[in-house]
Amino acid sequence: MVTAFVLVVAVMALIAVRLYLQYGSDEYSPTVTNLTDVSATSVMVTIRVQKPEAPAICTVNAEAADGSVLGTADVPVPAGTDVTVTSRVTTTGRPYIAEVPSCRPAG
């Protein structure tokens, strides 16, 4: 019983570390500020990213009201520590919301 508990805790710790490495960097703070030109095939998404000086790439998801992802785009973010970028995300349906699950250094 104790062995099973220790194994479960170890697996949970590994999953937590992996998710933090994938999504948890506090170097990047993206915020969706605006959605415009919303249609059944695309949406214009404006994001503000507070980050280190170097260029970055942020993943932007356009989602339906039920949370399903209708489209994804990797959006280049130029150099600067507080940058606003607008990009078109192609979708398979009319999106309800957009979010930025992750950003990473460009290159």
Image (cartoon, rainbow, N blue to C red):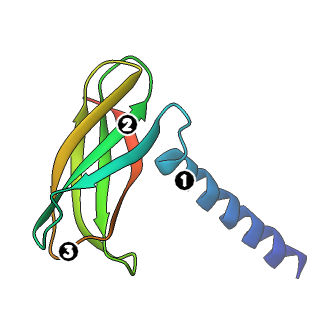
Dot placed on the residue nearer the N-terminal end, 2 or 1: 1
**Residues packed near mark 2 inside 10 Å, few (<14), some (14 to 19) or many (20 plus):** some
Against 105, residue 68 (above or below) is below
15 or 88: which is nearer to us?
88
Against 89, residue 75 (above or below) is above
Dot in front, 3 or 1 = 3
Q: Which residue is mark 3?
A: 94
Circles 3 and 1, Cβ within 8 Å, touching? The answer is: no
In which quadrant of the rendered view does residue 69 lie? Answer: bottom left
Q: Secondary structure at mark 2?
A: strand
Residue farthest right in this picture: 2
Amino acid type of the residue tagged 2 in the rendering: Arg
Q: Secondary structure at mark 3?
A: loop
Residue drawn at (63%, 57%) of the image: 16
Dot placed on the residue nearer the N-terminal end, 3 or 1: 1
Q: Position of residue 94 (x, y in %)?
A: 20, 74
Dot in front, 2 or 1 = 2
Amino acid type of the residue tagged 3 in the rendering: Arg
In which quadrant of the rendered view does residue 38 lie? Answer: bottom left
Q: Position of residue 55 (x, y in %)?
A: 29, 24
Q: Which residue is mark 2?
A: 48
51 or 105: which is nearer to us?
51
Which label was assigned to residue 18?
Answer: 1
